[in-house]
Amino acid sequence: MTDIPANGRRLPDRLDQPLKSALMSWESLLVLVALGIFIANSFASPYFLNAWSLSDLTFNFTEKALIALAMALVIITGEIDLSVASIIALASTLMGLALQYGADTPMLVAVGIGVGILCGAFNGFLVTGLKLPSIVVTIGTMSLFRGIAYIVLGDQSFKGYPKDFAWFGQGYVFWVISFELVLFVVAAIIFYVLLHHTVFGRRIFAIGNNAVAAQFSGVRVDRIKFVLFCLTGLMSGIAAVLLTARLGSTRPSIAQGFELEVITMVVLGGVSILGGAGSIIGVVLAALIIGLVTFGLGLLNVPGIVMSIFTGSLLIVVIALPILWRMWKERRA
Amino acid sequence: MNRLMKSREIWLALAILAVIVLVTLRFPRFSQPHNLLTILNDTSILMMLALGQMVVILTRSIDLSMASNLALTGMIVAMVNAAFPMIPIPLLIAGCIVVGGALGAFNGVLVWRLDIPPIVVTLGTLTIFRGLVFVISGGAWVNAAQMSPDFIQLQRGSLLGVPNLTWFAVALAILFYLLMTRTPLGRSFYAIGVNPTASVYTGINVGRTKFLAFAISGAVSGLCGYLWISRYVIASVEVASGYELTIIAACVIGGVSIAGGIGSVAGALLGALFLGVVNNALPVIGVSPFWQMAISGAAILLAVVLNARGERSKGRVILKKAEGAA
């Protein structure tokens, strides 16, 4: 799928001491970028620096960022999941269908999350059970899942979600802090501990560095990959609940193009697309940066499509900077 | 004969034939030459794009920016045509190839000189190119009334009863066939896909070869930018939105291995044709267009599953033994 440098892949500089090196490296660059954008935003628009708008900001990225947390683990193992946005579409559609049959709020949430996990398990089965490349599998399921949403919905949309369901996407926990943000912070902490402080997390890095060696040292590579695909499915299901609740309706085109934004967050967060390296802190920072950029540009009335130029350039520039820096230093030496 | 039966292209051609025969049994008009020609014409652009993508995938890279490149080049050429209708169309087409090639070369330079993984580079340029379409057009459309008659008519005309658009695809297919089978460059695309390290030792410049692959896929996207705009006679920000994955799907169905090194011109063409035939057959047999996406998704999965056997590497076999021993 991706490129392997001729001299073999670079080893990650950290397997189990994330915080110490985090202060020095990629994450500090991201913090600088985030601060820069934050300051630029507050100068650019008088509406930026107040609690309500900062709280609104979170809606820009939390749903995608939730998926990015799980996607980071998948990409660290050297796989990829392009079907996440379609999982949202299918989960949202089946929630809408359940609503038509009179499901209440707990039932709707269960349907959304359940569909997410099932879709993830399907991906996981195709990748690990049949040994197929994940990029191709998930291009297929990406069409398949959203296709099923189109079959069910046609050109219609489901509306009329109950009020207590809408709270998941619109509610506030502590006056101005949205439920979505609280959920994201909790999830980020869980994923941080999972990846950087458990044996499971260490095995994820091991698989990404060398799946064959990991297999020989007793890591059940396929089982872990399967679990990770289920995990992205689960997070997509949760995102489907939040997004459906926030929009209050289901259309088959819901969350179109999310997969690329999620991957952008992960890659910008310093996760190697070749596998084997990355950190949750980086992904959280990258999500924050993208949230800040889109929100700031939104305040300046920049159309969404133009924002994509900024996020795309940000992705390339931030990744190219350390490389250019290294090349420049080598040239001088 | 045995080798022939194992060939992926033969099976794919048989599958396409089977779909056509099955539909014809119910609806005889489906296989009339005129209708088949229409399907071929409808699929021509996808075929060309699949050829460009194939070259990139062969080198273990991927180009996610093709559809955005197509939209950007298409918008540029449409605006130029609307502003200066007197510029001859062949010159415009040459311009499209150059502009598209330059955009592709930009991807290529980032991959070659900075060693950034292709999926990251093209993910970035996918959004950048699409955003630029909006910037240069201000969100406005260029419609049929603004385009010159020649601009629209060129690919609609026909030669020997075959539409010009199809001839474009035929010409490009021949060009790619010669490139892949008769030139050192074509051979090096395969070589670095099969084993980049060994290629370095045989004197192939891996980075430069990848750069050329991206420039080629860009040039094809640029050409298709003109063809797409003049076919659907509207240039907008939304042109070919999300099409990048359809192009990759066509390659995958056509047996181009995403791990690099495996694929053929015939395979890429047939992969695109398969999607085209299925999508054209659905409305004929009375299946609603809403089924289209799910069916192509299922077709992709089926193709990969069927293809998996042939591609399995020896390394996996060793691993299998290890699994058994453990």
Image: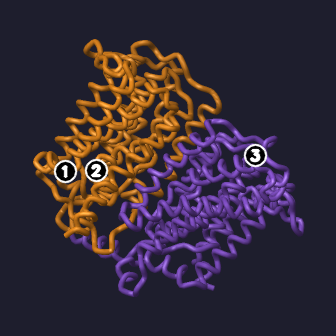
Toward the viewer: B141 or A266? B141
- Output the chain of dot 3: B
Would you place residue A63 above or below residue B191 in this image? above
- The amino acid type, in three-letter code, at marker 1 is Ser
Q: Are marks 1 and 2 in contact (CB under 8 Å)?
A: yes
Mark 2 or mark 1, which is nearer the start of the sequence? 1
Residue on which disc 1 sits: A25
Using the image, tell me which numbered label, if any, was put on residue B17: none
Label 2 crowding class (10 Å Cα cut-off): few <14, some 14-19, many 20+?
many
- The amino acid type, in three-letter code, at marker 3 is Ala
Taking the image as shown, residue B22 lies to the left or right of residue A326, namely right
- The tint chain B carries is purple
Q: Residue furthest right?
A: B160
Residue on which disc 3 sits: B82
Determine if marks 2 and 3 fall on one subunit: no
- Output the chain of dot 1: A
Q: Are marks 2 and 3 in contact (CB under 8 Å)?
A: no
- The amino acid type, in three-letter code, at marker 2 is Gly
Kindly report which numbered mark, 1 or 2, lies closer to the viewer in this rendering. Answer: 1
Residue at image point 25% right, 34% down: A187
Residue at image point 64% right, 45% down: B239
